[in-house]
Image (cartoon, rainbow, N blue to C red):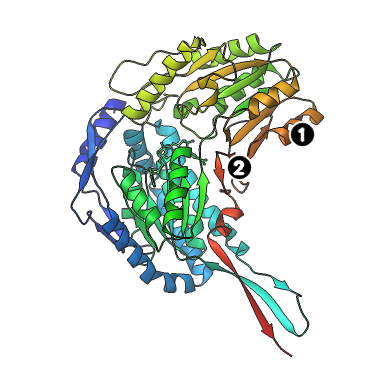
Amino acid sequence: MTAEMIAGELAATTRKHDWRLLVGGELVPARSGATFSDPSPVTGAVIATVPDADATDVDAAVQAARAAFPAWAATPLPERVAAVREIANRVRTHAAELGALDTLDGGNIARLARADAVSGAAMLDFFADSAHALTGQTIPASEGAVHYTTLQPIGVVARIVPYNHPIMFAAGKIAAPLIAGNCVLLKPPHQAPLSALRLGELIAHLVPPGVVSILTGAGPATGEAIVRHPQIRRIAFIGSAPTGQKIQEAAAQTGIKDVSLELGGKNALLAFPDADPVEVAEAAVRGMNFTWSGQSCGSTSRLVVHRSLHDRVVAEVVARISAMRIGDPFDETTDVGALVSQDQYAKVLRYLDIARGEGARVAVGGTPVEGDALIVPPTVFTGVTPGMRIAQEEVFGPLLSVIPFDTEEEAIAIANGVEYGLTAAVWTNDVRRAHRVAAAVEAGYVWINGSSRHYVGTPFGGVKSSGLGREECVEELLSFTETKAVHLAYR
Ligand code: NAD
């Protein structure tokens, strides 16, 4: 079957399918009956009609969650662990199907979209494995008494996730709340909601009704209703910095709420003169996540390279990009697929113009691929200076800016001279410089002689406008608990 046929057949199925929310253990339409059309960035056609949940649906999910909470919180930990492992197994078994939905719905290339489903399952397993971290302490605070702490679940918590890794986030991000004993409302992205809704079908009966709810919506309203709901006091958000700021504001207006934020980045890869230019080029291409069309928060979208390496590194980067296969994301040999939506495509085209207008030069790419799919090829800009918008603002597209430097101080100043602080990569063979620079860069996740890769179990998250809190680690699990101190007098 050709890639085009796979897309066509899948779209015929998704169009006919009755997509439903998961609320109170049931698959239901939005109470108002409202729906929205979900277009594919691969074919350009509408591929599904999706429920548009409003505040009434959110409240129904919250009430079902509140009803389910006491029993779920009291469920012995091994049983919660078993349920989460069951969810992981179900996701793994259906990885091909879930990945294909993401490819059609979000444009990610087939082999990586499948891998995303497997990563989501791995994250579920990681938190099942980490359940033993839910322990308290005893503290010798006074004589004749025992002072101890317990970690208690919070209650009804929310997970609002973005579009770039739809199934990985939908599956993986419900794990920590569930293991900790919470009931969770998941809000998938409107651009690519199908894999999360399919997840709802697959897991509806693996946990008691109300423990997991999945609510899709056409725009910000569904997420806003979740954030403003008075009985949701813990909101874990992954998305853009402007939305994160709105969420903090809305949360503060409606209660005392615990908000964690995993936001955007304008991350730097710093290449020092002693680094191998070929290795740097490989790391820069990998670090830019061109295989996700650059739509990854951790992408090192600024290649800050010592002037002595500049030309060689740029030539190697261009050679590697020129060898990438760009096109149909369903084709198993494709390396770069489509951007998620018309809006995101238009934004990336706008930044191509902005960069050119600022005087940056295109070393490779720069012209969108013709056809139905929303494809911008990997693009490298040289002649970029640190103050340009292309060097300051998150594009979330396949645009890499190369910025030369002369001294270590200058390199650090460039790296830190942006609003964001998510990741950074340091390339050098000088061990002192490596640690010095890693300590000096304002970022939450730093690779020395590496890029792009996430290591499950190590804390991921940002500083400055890149967010608050850490995920993919035990800290994420603990962030869904409250500490209670108990004092027992025995004298
Ligand atoms: P976005 O902020 O537009 O939307 C994210 C989610 O929030 C979606 O589900 C959306 O429907 C919802 N939402 C939108 N407005 C809302 C509101 N007012 N209240 C509540 N919810 C609302 O982000 P996006 O465009 O989907 O994703 C791209 C962004 O996500 C980039 O900035 C990227 O860097 C970031 N991101 C960060 C991480 C991380 O771990 N730090 C990971 C992936 C993506």
Comparing labels 2 and 1, the label whose residue is closer to the camera = 1
Tell me the residue that label 2 is attached to: 455
- At x 36%, y 50%, the residue is 224
- At x 50%, y 27%, the residue is 393
Q: Is residue 209 visible?
A: no
Mark 2 vs ligand 1: CB below 8 Å: no
- As drawn, 51 above or below 397: below
Tell me the residue that label 1 is attached to: 435
- At x 63%, y 32%, the residue is 424
Q: How far is the residue under mark 2 from the one under mark 1?
A: 19 Å
Residue 196 on image: x %, y %: 35, 47
CA neighbours of label 1 inside 10 A, class few (<14), some (14 to 19), many (20+)? few
- The amino acid on which the numbered mark 1 sits, given as a three-letter code, is His
Which image quarter is the C terminus in?
A: bottom right
Query: Which residue ends up furthest to the bottom in the rendered image?
Result: 491
Residue 104 on image: x %, y %: 32, 34
Query: Which residue ends up furthest to the right in the rendered image?
Result: 432
- Figure quarter occupied by ligand 1: top left
- At x 48%, y 74%, the residue is 74
Q: Which mark is residue 449?
A: none
Q: What element carries label 2?
A: loop
- The amino acid on which the numbered mark 2 sits, given as a three-letter code, is Tyr
Which image quarter is the N terminus in?
A: top left
Q: What element carries label 1?
A: helix
- As drawn, 232 above or below 336: below
